[in-house]
Image (spheres, rainbow, N blue to C red):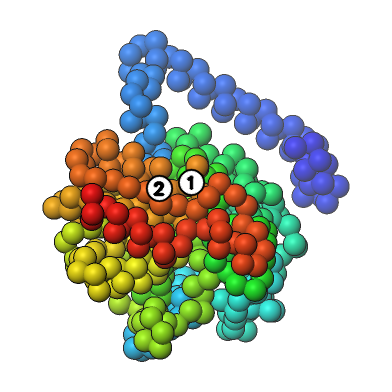
């Protein structure tokens, strides 16, 4: 503060007397408010926080009508294009930026290069360098810029180039971004949508810095929202809803994009099923379903949805009917809708591409048990390992074959 005061005085904007007067006036304001609070408590006109719900209200207050209206306003003109996941994210970012001049997109290589995977290609040319810009190769700077621009009234959409790099700067989310609304009792917020390229199964490039399935740190942050698209059809609606949550509720959202699905076209060889049009809705706290078998439900997300849909096709050839449930929202888990969708199923298999310990599947099992689900539950997941290079990655990552085997075992029990 002293440095700021000196700069203002040196620039001739304020005099020393002006600075002293402002400090004294602010001290008087603070002391007056503090005394009023004490007096209100003593008189009974105000009371201390007395319930857990009251403590958590700044983190959990939800405005569904406002969120839905804002998400709807971010739609572009429908053109019927069938796009890949990367293409749909690019198109949706374009629509969002066109609809809202307060949205900024920035990060390492997102502007001039258009992103490592081309996801932000063309945005700088269309919206200019003031709204789409490259940052230093430093994740703390990326998220710090998001913090500052959010407080200045913008809606930042920063990119963390790989999930493993988030760990260098995760406290910018845990200790700063996500806690502001909590510690100010909702008076201040810094809503943002942090795009992160992540998860595993990326071929021909990597090691554990570029193939990372560690999401535990995100699941541990109160109030944060984490969405994971499994295809182009989900991506647009999820991203719009995240932006709406940031705008209307000041939420800190993470949009975790499966790298391995960015440019994937086929579910089965040559079917082009993963090229989709923008038709899906994705209300916060709701799941999506694929297929309609009634013998087994596979609960999954991200890359697991593609593997599970392929596994379901193989199981159908054995006469086993499967429904695949895509969580979409992994923080907080969409518990109520999930339990509703699982009514009537006597068997649930959780296919979790994250690590066995600290992954998403643990929370799903807990949600089912605490929610009163009384059918059979089984979980398959990736191993408690970093993701190695090359073919060795297949030894520790959840596979389609493991999903098929676990499902068949549950049916035969």
Residue 272 occupies quadrant = bottom left
- Quick one: 310 or 223, which is closer to the camera? 310
Residue 35 drawn at (x, y percent): 50, 17
Identified at 82% across, 46% down, the residue is 7
The residue indicated by pointer 1 is 356
Is 84 positioned to the left or the right of 43 in the image? right
Identified at 59% across, 61% down, the residue is 393
- As helix, strand or loop, the secondary structure at mark 2 comes to helix
Identified at 39% across, 78% down, the residue is 267
- Quick one: 210 or 173, which is closer to the camera? 210
Is 302 positioned to the left or the right of 192 in the image? left
Residue depth check, mark 2 versus mark 1: number of the one nearer the observer: 1
Separation of residues labelled 2 and 1 (CA atoms): 8 Å
Q: Is residue 402 above or below residue 52?
A: below
Labels 2 & 1 near each other (Cβ < 8 A)? yes
- Check the image and name the residue furthest to the right: 10
């Amino acid at each position: 503060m002293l440095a700021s005061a000196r700069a203002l005085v040196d620039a001739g904007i304020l005099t020393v007397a002006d600075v002293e007067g402002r400090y004294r006036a602010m001290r008087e304001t603070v002391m007056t408010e503090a005394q009023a609070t004490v007096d209100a408590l003593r008189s009974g006109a105000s009371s201390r926080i007395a319930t857990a719900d009251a403590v958590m209200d700044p983190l959990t207050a939800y405005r569904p009508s406002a969120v839905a209206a804002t998400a709807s306003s971010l739609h572009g003109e429908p053109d019927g294009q069938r796009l890949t996941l990367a293409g749909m994210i690019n198109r949706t970012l374009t629509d969002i930026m066109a609809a809202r001049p307060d949205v900024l997109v920035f990060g390492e290589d997102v502007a001039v290069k258009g992103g490592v995977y081309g996801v932000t290609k063309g945005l700088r040319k269309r919206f200019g360098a003031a709204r789409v810009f490259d940052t230093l190769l430093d994740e703390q700077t990326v998220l710090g810029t998001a913090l500052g621009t959010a407080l200045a009234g913008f809606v930042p959409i920063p990119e963390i180039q790989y999930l493993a790099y988030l760990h260098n700067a995760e406290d910018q989310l845990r200790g700063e971004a996500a806690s502001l609304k909590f510690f100010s009792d909702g008076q201040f917020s810094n809503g943002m949508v942090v795009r992160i390229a992540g998860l595993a199964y990326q071929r021909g490039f990597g090691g554990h810095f570029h193939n990372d399935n560690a999401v535990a740190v995100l699941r541990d942050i109160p109030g944060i929202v984490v969405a994971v698209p499994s295809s182009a059809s989900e991506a647009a609606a999820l991203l719009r809803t995240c932006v709406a949550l940031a705008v209307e509720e000041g939420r800190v959202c993470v949009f975790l994009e499966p790298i391995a699905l960015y440019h994937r076209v086929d579910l089965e060889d040559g079917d082009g099923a993963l090229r989709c049009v923008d038709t899906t809705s994705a209300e916060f706290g709701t799941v999506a379903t694929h297929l309609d078998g009634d013998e087994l439900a596979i609960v999954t997300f991200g890359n697991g949805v593609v593997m599970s849909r392929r596994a379901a096709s193989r199981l159908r050839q054995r006469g086993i009917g499967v429904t695949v449930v895509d969580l979409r929202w992994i923080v907080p888990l969409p518990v109520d809708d999930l339990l509703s969708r699982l009514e009537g199923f006597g068997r649930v298999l959780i296919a979790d591409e994250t690590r066995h310990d600290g992954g998403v599947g643990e929370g799903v099992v807990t949600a089912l048990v605490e929610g009163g689900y009384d059918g059979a539950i089984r979980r398959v997941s990736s191993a408690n390992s970093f993701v190695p290079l090359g073919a060795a990655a297949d030894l520790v990552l959840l596979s389609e074959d493991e999903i098929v085997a676990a499902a068949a075992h549950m049916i035969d029990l």
